Image (cartoon, rainbow, N blue to C red):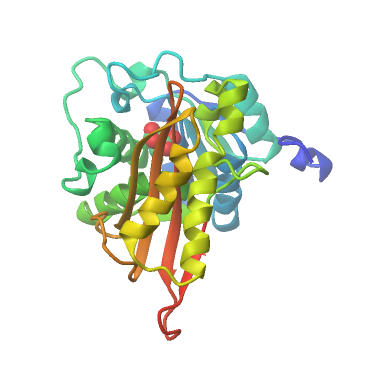
């Protein structure tokens, strides 16, 4: 089945409402809460793909109404990043969400979110400064600021994020805990193309040869997965395996390759408890992320479950 049309196939008509103002979005979700309904929020920057739609389906399992926000947040882009060329496809995105029978699309103009005189930012210390935070200074401050605002506006009981942006999900969970937010953060599995490439709106930037080369991220993680299956637990040796695969691809320039504790995001020297192998790699000017979750299986000696 294509991306759209699941509801049509079930013979249902779509009734999605698109909301552009903070005031109306607040009223709608406050009313839903007052009626005792569970509100789910899927925050996105649009250019929706199957990864986003899997978050929507996860939200629909738990919540009604589901709100999907589409807002390309200027605050999370650095001065030399891709804010102006970031794909904007509101009409196509809206059709996809209607096809899934989403109740509300929240698509505010920038001035609704950042009116003149805006001055307040949210920063999660420590984990925001590593990895993505080091490569993209200010990025996570922009993410947490807009996500907190979206939570205040939509008042969701549950909010859904993808594991592809594992550090983002960890930071948002920290913010929710530190600020006693009434929103539970749900982190959903990776969505991949059939050849293994992690789904991302930025994949649309890749030229044909870069798109072919981009599966090197998945191949690097898969090579580490095979080593773990064969008994390797040493992080330095696993990193060397991943770097070797990446270095063999001439179109790929790694930004970072790390294995970290999934809670603290500090590097580990050996696999333990719950770890993430994280990659950020340039294909031409496009920077792609991927990761693999490695979790110790309790009561099974030194056995690890790997989720790619
Ligand atoms: O993951 C994203 O698309 C964005 O960082 C988010 C969470 C929608 C905030 O702008």
- Toward the viewer: 172 or 18? 172
Please provide percent x and percent y for residue 5: 76, 36
Total marks shown come to 0
- Toward the viewer: 7 or 49? 49
Please provide percent x and percent y for residue 268: 26, 61
Horizontal side, residue 57 vs residue 261: left or right: right
Please provide percent x and percent y for residue 124: 20, 45
- Toward the viewer: 20 or 256? 256
- Toward the viewer: 12 or 2? 2
Please provide percent x and percent y for residue 163: 45, 50
The answer to whether any part of residue 31 appears in the image is no
Residue drawn 40% across and 79% down? 302
Q: Compared with residue 163, is residue 49 higher up or lower down, i.e. above or below?
A: above
Q: Residue 90 sits in which quadrant?
A: top right
Q: Compared with residue 12, is residue 23 higher up or lower down, i.e. above or below?
A: above
Q: Quadrant of the N terminus?
A: top right
Residue drawn 54% across and 34% down? 214
Q: Quadrant of ligand 1?
A: top left
Horizontal side, residue 145 vs residue 88: left or right: left
Residue drawn 61% across and 31% down? 212
Q: Compared with residue 199, is residue 274 higher up or lower down, i.e. above or below?
A: below
Horizontal side, residue 145 vs residue 48: left or right: left
Q: Compared with residue 295, is residue 64 higher up or lower down, i.e. above or below?
A: above
The answer to whether any part of residue 166 appears in the image is yes
């Amino acid at each position: 089945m294509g991306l759209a049309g699941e509801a049509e196939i079930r013979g249902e008509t779509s009734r999605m409402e698109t909301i552009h103002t903070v005031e109306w979005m607040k009223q709608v979700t406050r009313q839903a809460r007052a009626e005792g309904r569970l509100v789910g929020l899927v925050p996105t920057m649009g250019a929706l793909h199957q990864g986003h739609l899997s978050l929507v389906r996860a939200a629909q399992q738990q919540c009604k109404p589901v709100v999907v926000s589409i807002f390309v947040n200027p605050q999370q882009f650095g001065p030399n990043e891709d804010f102006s060329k970031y794909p904007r496809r509101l009409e196509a995105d809206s059709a996809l969400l209607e096809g899934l029978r989403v109740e509300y699309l929240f698509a505010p103009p920038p001035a609704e979110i950042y009116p003149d005189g805006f001055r307040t930012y949210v920063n999660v210390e420590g984990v925001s400064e590593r990895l993505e935070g080091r490569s993209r200074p200010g990025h996570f401050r922009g993410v947490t600021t807009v996500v907190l605002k979206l939570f205040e506006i939509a008042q969701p009981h549950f909010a859904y994020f993808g594991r592809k942006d594992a550090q983002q999900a960890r930071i948002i969970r920290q913010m929710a805990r530190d600020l006693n937010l009434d929103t539970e953060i749900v982190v959903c599995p990776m969505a991949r193309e059939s050849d293994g490439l992690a789904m991302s709106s930025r994949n649309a930037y890749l030229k044909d040869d870069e798109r072919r080369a981009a599966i090197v991220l998945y191949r690097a993680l898969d090579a580490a997965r095979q080593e773990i299956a064969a008994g390797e637990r040493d992080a330095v040796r696993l990193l060397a395996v991943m770097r070797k695969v990446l270095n063999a691809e001439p179109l790929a320039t790694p930004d970072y390759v790390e294995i970290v504790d999934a809670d603290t995001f500090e590097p580990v020297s050996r696999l333990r408890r719950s770890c993430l192998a994280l990659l950020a790699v340039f294909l031409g000017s496009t920077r792609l992320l991927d990761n693999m979750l490695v979790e110790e299986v309790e009561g099974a000696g030194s056995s690890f479950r790997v989720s790619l």
